[in-house]
Amino acid sequence: MDKDLLGQIPMFRKSLLRRIPSRRVRVRVLRLERGSAMADGRMKAVVADGGSEEEEEEETVKLDLGLSLGSLVRAEGSSSRARRDWELVEDGERSDWSSNWDLSMGGSRFGDKYGPWSGWQGGIEEVFDVDGKGKELEDGNVFGLDGTEFGRDFHHKRAKVLDYNDASKYDATTSLGIESSALLPIDDQIGLQSSGIPFDDEITLGLCPMQSEIGIRKLSESDNGGEGGGNSGGRNVEDVEARMDLSDDLLHLVFSFLGLKDLCKASASCKQWQSAAMHEDFWKCLNFEKTQISPQNFEAICLRYPKATLVNLVGVDNSDVLVMDAMINLRRLDTLILGEGQLGDSFFHALTDCPALINLFIFDTSLGNGMQEITVNHERLLNLRIVKCRALRISVKCPQLQTLSLRRTGMAHAFLTCPLLQELDISSCHKLSDAGIRSAATACHSLELLDMSSCSCVSDETLREIAFACPNLSVLDASYCPNISLELVRLPMLTDLILHNCEGITSASMSAVAYSHMLKALQLDNCGLLTSVSLDLPHLQNISLVHCRKFVDLNLRSPVLSYIKVSNCSALHCISIVSNALQKLVLPKQESLATLSLQCYQLLEVDLSDCESLTNSICDVFSDGGGCPMLKSLVLDNCESLTMVGLRSSSLVSLSLVGCRAMTVLELSCPNLQKVNLDGCDHLERASFCPVGLGSLNLGICPKLAILQIEAPKMSVLELKGCGVLSHASINCPCLTSLDASFCRKFRDDSLSTTASSCPRIESLILSSCVSVGPDGLSSLHWLQYLTLLDLSYTFLMNLQPVFETCSQLEILKLSACKYLTDTSLDALYKEGALPALRELDLSYSSIGQSAISELLAACTNLVSLNLNGCGNMVELLWGTSNSHSSDMLVGDYSPNSEVMESDGESFRKPERLLETLNCTGCPNIKKVLIPPAAWCFHLSKLNLNLSTNLKEVDLACFNLSILNLSNCSSLEILRLDCPRLTNLQLLACSMLSEEALEAAVSQCNILETLNVHSCPKINAVYLAKLKVACPSLKRIQSSA
């Protein structure tokens, strides 16, 4: 209920005074005791939930459930004075128009018991004189509304909201409330708190949500009304109507998702919402679980909704009283839920007065006085649950009853007269004796389901009598019954048998189980004495064997067996399964399992992880002809007894052998195999994949693998790195594009030649640390017409001529740490124009000399990235100062990016260099770096000279250089930079660099953003502050100052 509702009070008062008949009637209007004023005069509605603070609860006026639904009932304890305040004074009797105030949802008239205003408290505020004794109001509505009866607005179906233009004019001195002791709302509490707007006459009227029906009319004149009220001055309030376009059908749909508490809140908003919330569709199930509600309110609701079919009173105070009202007033009640209280004999005697009842649920309740028999007698009851209750004896006489649960009920005797009973649950009835169980169960000849788990006293004799008396018994749960062994028990119709933690169940008990030819599900978890199970049941679908510590042998034969759960059976040694329906078999951590026999023609997945005792014979089970023709996935992780794995399967798609450390030989002939995992197979010596459907293969680290044979028509990626002793490799993969043979130190020329001829589509070939590869192997690269990347790092090669002659499409060449290369090894690159497509060259830590490096820089203009890290023979980097003839070209090839020159009367052009990245990290002997504008390094963007400790002079003129790293160049003294696009300059630990040299260097760097001069002792903080002012583009300066 919000300010839109309370804002109707002035209009209600004016309409009331204008429409009162001539008869003078003295009406006493109550002032509600709660009246904390609000400074801004606005109306405020607060819904107080049960979890609010105690102080808030004291200040919040509680709104009763009945009021929220338009029903006003008398509250207990209301004073007689408050009740008399609404009596007519003149005639000493109630007014005739009081009938118009009938707001009870049950349709009862205004009276002593359900007087709508009887629960309100307060003092007399004002007296009206009403003329016209015996006359009705003009239209039957005391509020002066259009329409024929209160609570209906035939002109508008949508809510109207009053807009206050100047709410600050009103002094909030009154409030709306209801006596908290009498009004206990649904679902904890529903509180309503508001500040009122005083009338000119200081009139305060009690208002309930039903009064939200009051129509709002635009006021054009000042409020002068009220007999004896006086006039406090002209007050013009402009009312604005706001319509909510919610149809009744839409509201009905939205409210169908609300609970009773939310429906009560919504009903306090407006007439339309109240009408929608009061619809009987939402009140068919009266769920008052753990709700405080008074008997008067509950009875009023029952009267208002006599068609309710369900009542839930679990955790409700006085539920024994409320349930009697429900059974009397709700003639269609079919479901009754009670709990957490006490029910006397009167309740069970009154059950016959509720003829429609078919479901009765009672939880955690004391029945009777604990000293006498409780009788449940009903002709139409179908389902009865008495769970966790306390009673001495229980007698059930229900001829139509089908389901009965007495679980965890502490009774010594149970007498059942239920000829149609089909399901009986007496689990955990510890006080019920073996004879009591026998008497109760054998009395129900139609029984189909019996749950007597945790009834420790039940015996085989009782089971035999139950089997004889209940021939249709199909489901039996005898878990935690230590005295049963199923000796001579015959249950031919049994379909589900649950025997958890039955210490008396042994292998001999399986003969009784085998007699149940209709059995579909069998659960034998934690049967500690069970050693073997051998069953041939045509309908068995699933079986569970968990924590059977002495279980050794499992033999199952069933055409429809689809689920097997065997776990933590540490002694299990042999398994034999025959099934046409089993698709997945998971047997993890069966440490003793050594023999497995499967005839499962639909089996798709098998997981035998951590079965440490499995032998090599397991491979025959999963190969073609072994009984699993449809197998797709096989997991043999950590099967440490496997030494040779040989699989020939036309259906296998995925294979995992992770952690099979004892395996030395692997032979796979699986043409559809797409995934294999060999991580941790570090003792593998010989492997054959012929044929397989693998798209990629990573052998991981197999340091003992010497012989490898692969035939994979679809394979595109092969990684052999870590196979250090691989000497014989036959790789036939016509679609292979990437081969990584790093650290295969014994990979020889013949293996490389065979691989190159059978895999002509290789694009990336990594032979790093393949020290056995020589010129003969490199000559076979002429088969690889698509080769673009060749890595020969850490090899002993001296002659690269086979590479230059056969790999014309090569783009990336890596020769890192090739210690035996000489200056003449690269002559073909800068003298003969070999490898015209080469873009990236790595000569890190090689023995290449100064002259070869200079020639490379001058001649190989197509290089994009050059790596010279750790080249100890390089003493200087001088570009564009000599050997210019090697880079000159005829002017006929002129391009816009070349410079035209004349020499000896002929025109030439100097081509533009494409180099972008130059790395010279850790070159200990380099002393000078000079790249003048004549070098034409327009694309150079990154230069790294880190750790060049002897470098003294750097002079760069590079237009596009953006990153320059000179860190740890401890001898650097001269730094000249003409790099207008430099943004990052690293000068870490340049101990000889002065402030003057730094200032001269950065003066031409107009967009420099990052400068690192940490550990530069000659550069102080004061200078850096000036530098930042002089170079405004600097954003980050790293220094030790």
Image (cartoon, rainbow, N blue to C red):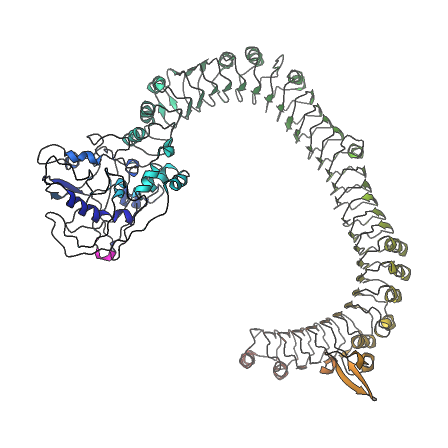
Left or right: where 638 falls relative to 542:
right
The image quarter containing residue 514 is top right
Picture quarter with the N terminus = top left
Q: Residue 650 placed where, x, y %?
A: 79, 37
Q: Which residues are magenta?
A: 163-171
Magenta stretch, main secondary structure class? loop
Q: Residue 628 placed where, x, y %?
A: 76, 32
Q: Nearer the viewer, residue 993 or 257?
A: 257
Picture quarter with the C terminus = bottom right
339 to 202, vertically: above or below? above
Left or right: where 464 falls relative to 97:
right
386 to 120, vertically: above or below? above
Q: Nearer the viewer, residue 154 or 488?
A: 154
Q: Residue 772 placed where, x, y %?
A: 87, 58
Left or right: where 339 falls relative to 759:
left
Taking the magenta stretch, the answer to whether it contains residue 560 is: no
356 to 682, vertically: above or below? above
Is residue 932 visible from the viewing direction of this image? no
Is residue 678 visible from the viewing direction of this image? yes
Taking the magenta stretch, the answer to whether it contains residue 166 is: yes
Left or right: where 761 falls relative to 518:
right
The image quarter containing residue 988 is bottom right
